[in-house]
């Protein structure tokens, strides 16, 4: 199913293609009959405006007449071009009538002369009122509400007279709650079992400052055994013994001082 947008573009494309094709033959027809180029353009322009107006307001008579005028111009132009007919009085008369007829019908469509006359508001309203059917007999409208056979009972009072009300009892005030001070409990510091205690002098921290480390480092004798002919670098000491950067640097500095 095509959308409204598609329908609009199809109509526009068809109109533009038809007008462009017929305008060339109409222009050549006017030129063959002796019109100058600026004046010859007016023939296809007047016919195209009439066709557009007829299609826009879409009146069957004007649509048919505009297409007949356009077909007459096309037949005359192609007949002259093919050499079937020659320029004659009859041909000039027919072509000369095309523009006045198109001018007349275009203005008639634009001004809406073919529209049905619209009655005045007063006349239309009066005619509409007259056409409204009036019933022959109307039901009588009551003047007021009918009287009730039994009266509506009055609304009873909230507290009938003679009823004894119960005395209001005051609620007791809540007892005052005295807050109890919270006693602080000291948590003893965790104690390390002697079996798992670590001697800090046996395993010095490799990242501690140089002034607090052990000198000479207990690893130096092992390094001298493993590297008797060279002084290993910091990276090699770290990879071989699994120690940190500060301790490896300290060991290397000590070895360099001994060898120097």
Image (cartoon, rainbow, N blue to C red):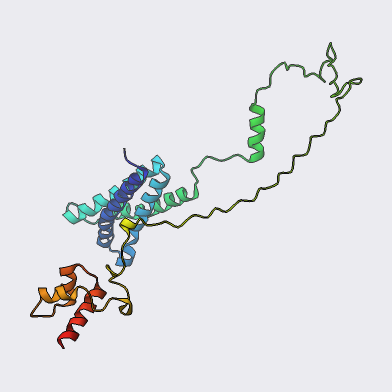
Q: Is residue 124 above or below residue 40?
A: above
Q: Where is residue 64 in the image (x, y as percent from the top left)?
A: 35, 42
Question: Is 250 left or right of 129, judged from the image as shown?
Answer: left
Q: Tell me, yes or no, if residue 140 can be seen here.
A: yes
Tell me, yes or no, if residue 36 can be seen here: no
Give above or below for 97 relative to 118. Answer: below
Left or right, 228 with reference to 7: left
Which residue occupies 63% across, 41% down? 120
Residue sitting at x 69%, y 19%:
135
Q: Total of numbered circles in the picture?
A: 0
Which residue occupies the foreground of this view, 177 or 165? 177
Quadrant (top left/top right/bottom left/bottom right) for the N terminus: top left
Residue 21: give x, y in percent of width and height. 25, 54
In the rendered image of this protein, does residue 250 appear above or below residue 158? below
Rendering quarter of residue 196: bottom left
Q: Position of residue 245 (x, y in %)?
A: 24, 73
Q: Position of residue 177 (x, y in %)?
A: 71, 44
Extreme-bottom residue of the structure: 260
Q: Which of 172 and 185 is in front in this view?
A: 185
| Pick the front one: 96 or 22 | 22
């Amino acid at each position: 199913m095509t959308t409204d947008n598609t329908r609009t573009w199809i109509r526009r494309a068809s109109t533009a293609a038809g007008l462009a094709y017929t305008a060339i033959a109409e222009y050549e027809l006017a030129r063959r009959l002796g019109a100058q180029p600026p004046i010859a353009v007016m023939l296809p322009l007047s016919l195209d405006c009439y066709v557009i107006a007829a299609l826009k307001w879409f009146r069957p008579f004007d649509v048919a007449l505009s297409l007949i005028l356009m077909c007459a111009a096309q037949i005359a132009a192609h007949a002259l071009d093919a050499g079937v007919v020659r320029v004659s009085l009859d041909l000039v008369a027919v072509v000369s009538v095309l523009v006045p007829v198109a001018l007349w019908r275009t203005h008639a469509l634009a001004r809406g002369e073919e529209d049905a006359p619209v009655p005045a508001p007063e006349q239309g309203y009066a005619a509409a009122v007259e056409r409204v059917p009036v019933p022959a007999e109307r039901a009588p409208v009551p003047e007021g509400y009918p009287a009730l056979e039994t009266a509506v009972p009055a609304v009873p009072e909230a507290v009938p007279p003679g009823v004894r009300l119960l005395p209001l009892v005051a609620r007791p005030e809540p007892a005052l709650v005295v807050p109890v001070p919270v006693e602080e409990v000291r948590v003893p510091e965790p104690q390390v079992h002697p079996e798992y205690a670590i001697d800090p002098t046996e395993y010095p921290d490799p990242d501690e400052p140089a002034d607090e480390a052990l000198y000479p480092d207990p690893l130096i004798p092992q390094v001298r055994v493993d590297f008797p002919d060279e002084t290993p670098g910091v990276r090699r000491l770290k990879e071989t013994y699994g120690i940190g950067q500060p301790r490896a640097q300290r060991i290397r500095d000590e070895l360099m001082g001994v060898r120097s």
